Image (tube, coloured by chain):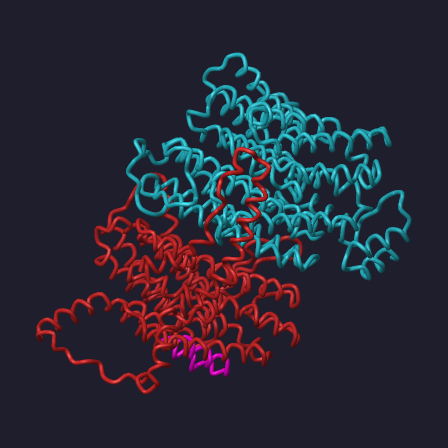
């Protein structure tokens, strides 16, 4: 019996990866039993469909498919890692809705679908945590970002009447207003200065893992890659502002984290500081900077979900009053959780031999080329984050062994396998980065993005004359003379 | 790949592979026994030492051995070269790392017998050996930085080896902070080389930089080297690092890690030769550290700290030699100092025991050590100098007051500002870190 060919076409696989999670969410909202099994199965199916998409994608055009595979796998791991206390139907339904909407946002080429996915991704967090929380900042930030992107897309569609992103490339649809609204949306969603406070607030209440997944969808960065970069090449003079804001966020939040006592807030601040570097890399206008940003995207996503997951497991075992102001000595009780925590945290700050080292190397190299100040501040922010992380690690896991706990289990088998998988991915990915990650994070899309800003060769907007093109390239690149020569040819 | 190229790769990779294998198996639930670990360690480092001996033989009869393993990763025109080089500068350091790691492994098998962190120590020893062999065999500054970072992190984790006590953990954190701060110099220096010279590889020739560029890169590398070699003003971390087990103190702060900074400067010698400012600064830092080390060491109350400052004094002198361009004198000095200090560190615990035994055997009549040179100074100055030396030249206090405390105050202020938006936490007192500096905690723990 042969399998129908359409099953392996990209649209069918994309639909399968998105709908598997949403169908499972609908089933769970009705059935409400075996939630972990149903949830992990759905995430696994999404991961298989995404893997098939990566396999089917042409060479150098697998960026979004890789991100889909990454997010599906991370969600699968998160569902398996969830402590029993958090694995009720409501939480897992929320995770599945978030998974489906994130995959949809990654895969879509339509503005309205992107808007729908953006709004849908926010709903589970607001439903489970945001509405009941006394913290108003996360709700305001997420709603503001949704409003900003809705207005931006409204402007673009009203001006051009086109919904397809590929048809709008290089046309600056909606003009400066739409561009500014998209920047505002990205700033709010990513927690870039001055909106950085909501990220730490969001991590303070409820189960940590869904919040970690919400933060690690990196919708702000997606907006930059998907809309801001390809649609508005003429706004190139304004892009360094985004880069400077991002690096200011990374440094500011890194300083802010130095004296933070709450482990949840501290991890959220580290996630924010490190993920802000992604924007700096994306804006660096160099292939290595953009590739570094995308690899860093992978690193931050995987390690932060692992770190938040381990912290939640510790809270469930040892109580929710863990603090970084004293030593807890938990390594004696949970050595494998301690080791996994250390490796993932050090990966985040660029430990050699892990994927974090490659991403930091590429990021610093790329940003130093175009923005020396950003390139200089990036290792400083990373160094401060490393100190904050090591402080958290030593306070949680080292120190005198505490004897007042009734439950002292180390990683359970299911947790152990997930954590070993994550650690292995980081290490093997770090040893063989080209084969595993970089190949999918570079290629045509990255080169195209680099060309759009700085590389002098093939940017050919249909409506721009040669003179405008020359001046644009001269402004956006350090290789203006080469650009001029090539354009004359 | 020729036989000797394969030997270079195996010498560098062997400890790393042992670490990776045992770490993965442990993570999955299996813990190896002490005897197996000691045996594997012995075999690994014996093989590494034999390999290095073969490389020395080859080097004596021929030219440098270069192994190009392609690029670790490549993006557009940027690539991370995987090049190993064994030349007359790297081979003494490779020999030192392989032989001393093996010796420390054998010593520790007995010294740490039935210690709860036995496996942890041996895993970190293998990781450290891998990092140091990688740093010494690297053919580019990029790869050297990778090994350098691994040496740093294993050093910190071994300082906190006795993690049930607060002082080692806090001291580990302090050392980690200093390392990370100084490593910024190495990272930015490497990327500056990439930016200006297009490469940071020295396998086939040193990156060519102009005068000004050479000064900037040299100063950045000097920052990294000073941090790793505990030169003034970063010397405060060295006595804190003595909280780790004696074998790790011996190999890290008596032999390999403390001399890694000097190795970096020896590698960057062509740059230093181009820059009078950097060379002068190297000499000044070395001289200051040597004087600081010898004075502070005289006021140290415990054996390991005295040894640490004795090492520091010698490393200061090695910096002076490097600054003057006396390359081979510096290498010989490093080899001698590393070997003697390792022996002294390993002997320190039993020496104290022997001394006490002998002291009681002769009825508490052991003769005094003789006249000290500082006794020739005026008494008032002696007292001032003692106080200065006892507080280790106030270096920690200066760093805390002018760098750490302002950062923590800023962080606390920002934390307070951030939390004013949440009514439930307004009353929460902000972080109290500035009131309890790490140094005071550490001193209480000594």
Which residue does the image show at 61% across and 62% down from the upper left? Answer: B191
Query: Could you tell me residue A449's position as x and y percent?
Result: 73, 46
What residue do we see at 53% from left, 30% from top?
A: A210
Q: Is residue B14 visible?
A: no
Which of B71 and A326 lies nearest the eye of the viewer? A326
Q: Quadrant of residue B8?
A: bottom left
The answer, for residue A459, to whether it is visible in the render is: yes
Residue in the image at 72% along x and 28% along y: A115
Say whether residue B387 is magenta: no
Q: Position of residue A457 (x, y in %)?
A: 79, 53
Residue A380, quarter of the rendered image: bottom right
Chain A palette colour = cyan
Residue B416 percent location from the top left of the image: 55, 44
Lateral position of residue B14 relative to residue B203, left or right: left
**Picture quadrant where residue B380 is located:** bottom left
**Residue at 71% from the left image edge and 38% from the top image edge:** A226
Picture layout, residue B322 above or below residue B48:
below
Q: Which residues are magenta?
A: B315-335
Question: Is residue B56 depicted above or below A106 in this figure?
Answer: below
B333 falls in the magenta region = yes
Quadrant of the drawing holding the N terminus of chain A = top right
Count of labels in the image:
0
Q: Position of residue B151 (x, y in %)?
A: 42, 60
**Which secondary structure is most common in the magenta stretch?**
helix
Q: Colour of chain B?
A: red
Tell which residue pokes out farthest to the bottom in this image: B376
User: Which corner quadrant holds the C terminus of chain A?
Assistant: bottom right
In the depicted structure, whether residue A471 falls above or below residue A23: below
User: Looking at this view, is B101 or A244 the one in front?
Assistant: A244
Q: Nearer the viewer, residue A261 or B284?
A: A261
Asked if B224 appears above or below B109 in the picture, the reply is: below
């Amino acid at each position: 019996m042969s399998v129908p060919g359409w099953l392996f076409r990209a649209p069918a696989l994309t639909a399968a990866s998105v709908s598997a999670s949403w169908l499972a969410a609908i089933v769970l909202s009705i059935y409400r039993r075996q939630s972990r099994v149903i949830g992990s199965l759905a995430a696994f199916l999404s991961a298989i469909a995404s893997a098939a998409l990566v396999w089917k994608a042409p060479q150098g055009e697998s960026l979004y498919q890789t991100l889909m595979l990454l997010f599906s796998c991370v969600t699968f791991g998160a569902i398996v890692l969830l402590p029993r206390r958090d694995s009720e139907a409501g939480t897992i339904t929320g995770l599945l809705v978030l998974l489906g909407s994130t995959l949809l946002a990654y895969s879509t080429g339509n503005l309205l679908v992107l808007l729908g996915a953006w709004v849908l991704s926010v709903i589970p967090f607001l439903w489970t945590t945001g509405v009941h929380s006394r913290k108003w900042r996360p709700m305001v930030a997420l709603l503001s970002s949704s409003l900003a992107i809705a207005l931006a897309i409204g402007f673009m569609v009203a001006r051009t009447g086109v919904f397809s992103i590929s048809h709008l490339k290089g046309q600056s649809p909606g003009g400066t207003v739409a561009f500014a609204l998209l920047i505002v949306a990205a700033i709010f969603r990513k927690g870039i200065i001055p909106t950085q406070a909501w990220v730490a607030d969001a991590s303070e209440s409820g189960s940590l893992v869904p919040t970690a997944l919400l933060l690690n969808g990196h919708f702000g960065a997606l907006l930059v890659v998907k809309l801001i970069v390809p649609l508005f090449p003429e706004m190139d003079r304004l892009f360094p502002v985004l880069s400077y804001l991002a690096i200011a966020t990374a440094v500011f939040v890194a300083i802010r984290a130095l004296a933070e006592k709450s482990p949840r807030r501290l991890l959220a601040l580290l996630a924010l500081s490190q993920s802000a570097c992604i924007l700096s890399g994306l804006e660096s206008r160099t292939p290595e900077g953009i590739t570094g940003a995308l690899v860093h995207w992978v690193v931050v996503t995987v390690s932060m979900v692992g770190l938040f997951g381990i912290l939640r497991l510790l809270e469930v075992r040892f109580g929710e009053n863990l603090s970084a102001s004293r030593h807890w000595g938990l390594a004696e009780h949970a050595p494998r959780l301690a080791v996994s925590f250390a490796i993932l945290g050090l990966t985040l700050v660029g430990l050699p031999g892990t994927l974090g080292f490659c991403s930091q190397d590429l990021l610093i190299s790329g940003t130093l080329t175009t923005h020396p100040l950003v390139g200089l501040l990036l290792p400083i922010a990373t160094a401060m984050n490393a100190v904050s992380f090591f402080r958290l690690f030593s306070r949680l896991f080292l120190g005198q062994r505490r004897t007042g706990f009734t439950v002292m289990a180390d990683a359970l088998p299911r947790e152990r396998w997930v954590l070993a998988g994550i650690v292995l991915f980081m290490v093997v990915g770090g040893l063989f980065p080209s084969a595993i990650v970089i190949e999918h994070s570079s290629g045509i899309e990255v080169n195209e993005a680099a060309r759009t800003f700085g590389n002098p060769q093939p940017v050919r907007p249909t409506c721009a004359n040669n003179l405008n093109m020359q001046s644009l390239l001269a402004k956006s690149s350090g290789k203006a003379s080469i650009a001029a020569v090539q354009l004359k040819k | 790949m020729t036989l000797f190229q394969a030997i270079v790769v195996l010498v560098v990779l062997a400890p790393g592979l042992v670490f990776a294998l045992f770490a993965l198996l442990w993570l999955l639930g299996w813990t190896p026994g002490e005897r197996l670990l000691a045996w594997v360690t012995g075999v690994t480092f014996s093989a590494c030492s034999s390999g290095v001996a073969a490389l020395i033989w080859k080097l004596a009869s021929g030219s440098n051995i270069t192994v190009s393993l392609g690029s670790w990763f490549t993006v557009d025109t940027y690539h991370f070269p995987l090049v190993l080089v064994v030349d007359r500068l790297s081979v003494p350091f490779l020999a030192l790392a392989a032989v001393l790691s093996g010796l420390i492994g054998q010593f520790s098998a007995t010294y740490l017998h039935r210690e709860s962190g036995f496996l942890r120590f041996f895993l970190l020893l293998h990781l450290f050996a891998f990092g140091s062999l990688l740093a010494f065999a690297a053919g580019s500054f990029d790869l050297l930085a990778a090994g350098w970072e691994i040496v740093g992190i294993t050093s910190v984790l071994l300082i906190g080896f006795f993690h049930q006590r607060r002082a080692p953990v806090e001291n580990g954190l302090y050392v980690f902070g200093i390392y990370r701060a100084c490593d910024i110099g190495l990272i930015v220096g490497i990327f500056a080389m990439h930016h200006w010279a297009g490469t940071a590889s020295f396998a086939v020739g040193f990156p060519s930089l102009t005068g000004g560029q050479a000064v900037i890169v040299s100063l950045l590398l000097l920052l990294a080297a000073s941090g790793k070699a505990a030169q003034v003003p970063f010397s405060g971390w060295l006595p804190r690092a003595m909280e780790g087990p004696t074998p790790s103190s011996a190999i890290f702060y008596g032999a390999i890690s403390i001399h890694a900074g000097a190795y970096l400067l020896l590698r960057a010698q062509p740059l230093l030769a181009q820059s009078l400012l950097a060379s002068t600064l190297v000499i000044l830092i070395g001289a200051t550290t040597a004087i600081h080390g010898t004075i502070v060491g005289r006021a140290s109350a415990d054996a390991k700290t005295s040894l640490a400052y004795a090492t520091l004094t010698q490393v200061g002198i090695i910096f002076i030699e490097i600054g003057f361009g006396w390359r081979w004198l510096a290498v010989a000095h490093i080899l001698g100092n590393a070997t003697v200090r390792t022996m002294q560190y390993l002997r320190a615990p039993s020496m104290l025991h022997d001394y006490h035994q002998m002291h009681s055997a002769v009825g508490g009549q052991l003769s005094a050590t003789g006249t000290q040179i500082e006794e020739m100074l005026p008494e008032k100055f002696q007292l001032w100098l003692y106080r200065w030396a006892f507080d280790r030249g106030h270096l920690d206090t200066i760093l805390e007051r002018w760098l750490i405390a302002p950062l923590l105050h800023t962080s606390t202020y920002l934390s307070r500002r951030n939390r004013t938006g949440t009514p439930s936490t307004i009353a929460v007192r902000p972080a109290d870190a500035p009131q309890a500096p790490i140094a005071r905690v550490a001193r209480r723990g000594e």
